[in-house]
Image: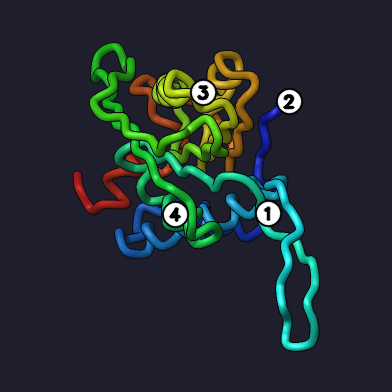
Amino acid sequence: MENVFVMDHPLIQHKISMLRDKNTGTNEFRKLVEEIAILMGYEALRDLPLEDVEVETPIETCMTPMISGKKLAVVPVLRAGLGMVNGITTLVPSAKIGHIGLYRDPVTHEPHEYYCKLPDPIDQRLVVMVDPMLATGGSAIAAVDFIKQHGGNNIKCMFIIGAPYGIERLHAAHPDVEIYVGHVDRELNDHAYICPGLGDAGDRIFGTK
């Protein structure tokens, strides 16, 4: 599928395998999520626009490339997406951070918004939406809908693990959005959990049950 990128870097695969282990504790899990976000962000941001600026080195003055235009906006889907924010801001410290809060109806599995706050003006920024898991795609589609409703038009989505069904649904709903996935898992179970997956990413990042 065009605009869908599956990360095949050995470091990303290795760290995802460590995330899956049920014996990986909260502190290590949180660090791994951040490290994977850095590695995925490095790949996803390779097309950032550059412009030459004048810099004075200890030897002479030169024209040298720096990132041009308005800076990044990182938008985590609450709450698990928060675990990936520091990874992106490690790469781009000037990035602005928005938040989208969604909860999933336990019966219908449909997403409902409870919070949305985005940097302004969002239409002039590259928006990187982050969420560790792409399961049914419902929350991701809703989050991208909200970003577009607020004027965002240059959007990349980043997920550590995705299910084929969720990837297909998100791509069908928003074919203009680039989707970056660390690993494509086998399927969703009857409770819409990714298999083999890694459990509930939010609970494992924040140490809740």
Where does residue 196 sit, x and y in percent of width and height? 47, 38
**Dot 4 and dot 2 residues touching (CB under 8 Å):** no
Q: Nearer the viewer, residue 107 or 121?
A: 121
Vertical arrangement, residue 49 with respect to residue 106, above or below: below
Q: Earlier in the sequence, mark 1 or mark 4?
A: 1
The residue to which callout 4 is attached is 33
Q: Earlier in the sequence, mark 1 or mark 2?
A: 2
Q: Earlier in the sequence, mark 2 or mark 3?
A: 2
Amino acid under disc 1: His
Left or right of 11? Residue 140 is left
The residue to which callout 3 is attached is 166
Q: Quadrant of the N terminus?
A: top right
Name the residue at 47% across, 33% down.
Answer: 122
Classify mark 3: helix, strand or loop.
helix
Disc on res. 9? 1
The residues bearing labels 1 and 2 have C-alpha atoms spaced at a distance of 19 Å
Where does residue 72 sit, x and y in percent of width and height? 53, 46
Work out whether residue 189 can be spotted.
Answer: no
Q: Earlier in the sequence, mark 4 or mark 2?
A: 2
The residues bearing labels 3 and 4 have C-alpha atoms spaced at a distance of 20 Å
Classify mark 1: helix, strand or loop.
loop
